[in-house]
Each structure stands twice: as C-alpha cells, then as structure tokens.
Image: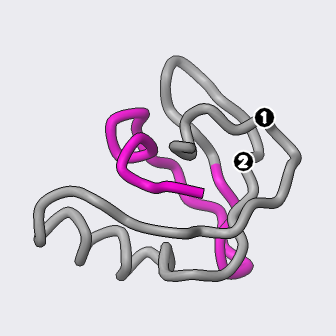
Amino acid sequence: MPLSMVKAGEPNVIKKVGGKSETKKFLENLGFVGGLVTVISEINGSLIVNVKDSRVAIGKDMANKILV
C-alpha cells in the first residue's frame, strides 16, 4: 500500500520505491531504502514522516511512490 494511505503513528516497513530513476534516487538519498518509516502528521496534502531518525516532509505525489 502507498505511504500516503498509512495512518499516523504506525511504523511501517518500506517495501519498494517506485517512479522515475531520478525520483528513486532522490527518495533513497532522503533515507527511503528499506527499514522503518512512520507518518508523524499530514498537513495540506504533505506528509511529515520519520525515517532513519530524521523527520522529512514529502508531498502526497512522492508518498504515493513509496510502498509499505
């Protein structure tokens, strides 16, 4: 299921990062490679997520490319 559909506060395992190669590379540089990701909150369509001990804000379109 895409990260954009996950409830806040639930830790999830990243299964796959989709999209174009530059999108994948961008998300992988942010830390979205395997491991756990937790949605902290959703504000105006953007998600605040905790990944690899960092908080990152991503848009809903990017969150749709991350499968958990």
Q: Position of residue 39 (x, y in %)?
A: 72, 47
- Left or right: 35 as drawn, with respect to 24: right
In the image, is residue 1 above or below residue 34? above
Q: Does the magenta segment cover residue 57? A: yes
Towards the viewer: 4 or 40: 4
Query: In which quarter of the view is residue 54 placed?
Result: bottom right
Which circle marks residue 7 in the picture?
A: 1
Q: Position of residue 11 (x, y in %)?
A: 82, 59
Q: Quadrant of the N terminus?
A: top right
User: In the rendered structure, are the residues bearing label 2 and label 1 in contact, judged by CB atoms less than 8 Å apart?
Assistant: yes
Q: Residue at x 52, y 49 (%)?
A: 57
Tally of marks: 2
Q: Residue at x 56, y 59 (%)?
A: 56
Instruction: Give the residue pinned by disc 2.
Output: 39
Determine crowd level at label 1: few under 14, some 14-19, many 20+ residues with C-alpha closer than 10 A. Answer: some
In the image, is residue 34 above or below residue 15? below
The part of the chain drawn in magenta is 49-68
Q: Position of residue 65 (x, y in %)?
A: 36, 50
